[in-house]
Structure formats: C-alpha cells, structure tokens
Image (tube, rainbow, N blue to C red):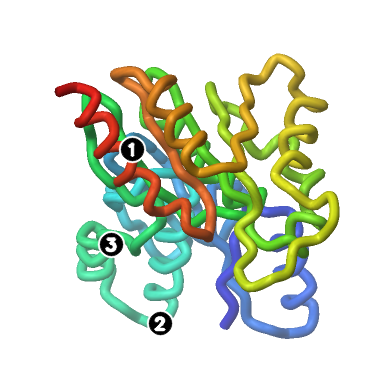
Amino acid sequence: MRVLCADDHETAALAERLRADGIAVVTYGTSVDADYRMIDVDVGRDGVSFSLHSEAHHVEDVRVPLAGLHNARNAAGALAMALELGVDPEPARTALNRFAGVARRFEHRGEVAGITFVDDYAHLPTEVAAAIAAARDGGWRRIVCAFQPHRYSRTETLWPTFADAFRGVDVLALTDVYASGEAPRPGITGKLLVNAVLDAHPWATVAYLPHRADLLGYLATVLRPGDLCLTLGAGDLTSLPDELQVRLRETAR
C-alpha cells in the first residue's frame, strides 16, 4: 500500500503510474481528487484542524497542535494510513491531538518583550517556504527571519531556487554557509542567496551578516513587540534564539 499526497502534482502523477502498474495506492490532501479529502481546514498559531472524508470513513474535527498547512497534510497522511490498516478512527484522532511534534520543527523557543521566538530545521527551499507559510498563519505583526545556508555543495546547486522561498517575510537576515564538514568553495557564500532574493524582489528588506556577532546585534536592534523571530537552518543557528533572548533581557535592565 502506498499513501501519497494528491496536492503535489508530481506525487499525484506518481500515484496514477503506480495504479497503472497494479500497485495499491490511496491519496490524501485538499484536492478534490484525493481519496481521503481534507475539508474544513483551519490553520492558526496554535495548531491546525480539519475533517477527513473518504468513501468509507468520515473523521470529523481532527486537531493537531502544530502550526502550518504542511503539518495538517502530514497528519492527514498518517490518519489515512491508519484507517487503511484498520485502526479505529477515534484513538487515531486522539493520538494526533496529543502529538507535540519533534524538536526543531516550528519549535517554540520562548518569548521576551512581546517577541516570539521559533526555530525550525528547514534548510531546503520548499521547507523554508512551508515554515514561512506556517508563520504567516500565526498572525504576528511582522516575521523577522534569520536563515543559515547549509553545506557549500548544496548552496552551490540550490541558491537560485531560494529566490522566492522567503516570500512573506518582512525582514530577512542571511548569514554565511554552515560547512557541516565540507571545505569552502570559492564564491559560494550566503551572498548568493541575498542576490537571488533581491533580483526577484528588489524591494525586499534583506541583510547579509556573515558574522554571528553582527547577526545577533542586527536582530536585537530590528525586533519589535508583536514580531515573530523565525530562525531557519540545519546548522548551529539553532542556538540563536537563546542568545537573542539573553541580549534582549540585558538590554531591558
């Protein structure tokens, strides 16, 4: 049995090819073509909710305490698989309602001076866009995002595809590449992403801050009450929310 998301056109096409080869497939998603269709989808700062309908099952008011439509889809996929395996809908729904997520996936890291801090492992363009979409659903006054590119090889290949990944961010701070054991490559820096974003969105507020101290100081200066500070990346940027909160507490004394 394959359980695939019908909302992605490539995955939907794969489902059709598998079915043509006689492989059992069920699909899920918001698409009208999904075998398990998500309806009444609601996304917010504190989580998502939806109902999941198929020819055989109708599960109402599924709630997951994780932000973002992508998490709603993940939950729908898990629930569809459970139902296909014969799991009773009610305990499955209860389990999703209690699922607290995993570390570094839109992880709430604290709040200081009316500023909320969230950290996410997202480091690929599609993951970055999904995290930012979840942030927009939260209703914060502004989204101030710090991003650390991951690996020189990956940055060299993917940097043009980040041009639209940060759409919806009010302030973007880009730092240098996290090597993750790789040797530096000539010309491969975070500046490539800055150029890609500004070429596509000339009016965007983007700062290139390759040094950690400069990044910390910049964010401490631009953040305001009501903002979301969203740190993204698979490297050592994950400690930045803690450092920023210490800095802001010291400034407030």
Residue 178 position, x and y percent, is: 60, 58
- Residue depth check, mark 1 versus mark 3: number of the one nearer the observer: 1
In depth, the one of 36 and 177 nearer the eye is: 177
Residue 116 position, x and y percent, is: 30, 33
| Left or right: residue 27 compared with residue 137 | right
Residue 218 position, x and y percent, is: 47, 27
Q: Residue at left 20%, top 63%?
A: 94
Disc 1: CA contacts within 10 A as few (<14), some (14-19) or many (>=20): many
Sequence-first tag of 2 and 1: 2
Above or below for 202 versus 143: above
Mark 1, residue position: 244
Rendered-image quadrant of the C terminus: top left
Sequence-first tag of 1 and 3: 3
- Residue depth check, mark 2 versus mark 1: number of the one nearer the observer: 1
Q: Say what amino acid the circle numbered 1 marks.
A: Leu
Report whether residue 233 is seen.
Answer: yes
Residue 99 position, x and y percent, is: 26, 62
Q: Say what amino acid the circle numbered 2 marks.
A: Leu
Above or below for 17 versus 211: below
Q: Secondary structure at mark 1?
A: helix
Measured Cα–Cα span from mark 1 to mark 3: 32 Å
Measured Cα–Cα span from mark 2 to mark 1: 46 Å
The picture quadrant where one finds residue 17 is bottom right
Q: Secondary structure at mark 3?
A: helix
Above or below for 246 versus 158: above
Mark 2, residue position: 85
Sequence-first tag of 3 and 2: 2
Mark 3, residue position: 96
Q: Residue furthest left?
A: 253
Disc 3: CA contacts within 10 A as few (<14), some (14-19) or many (>=20): some
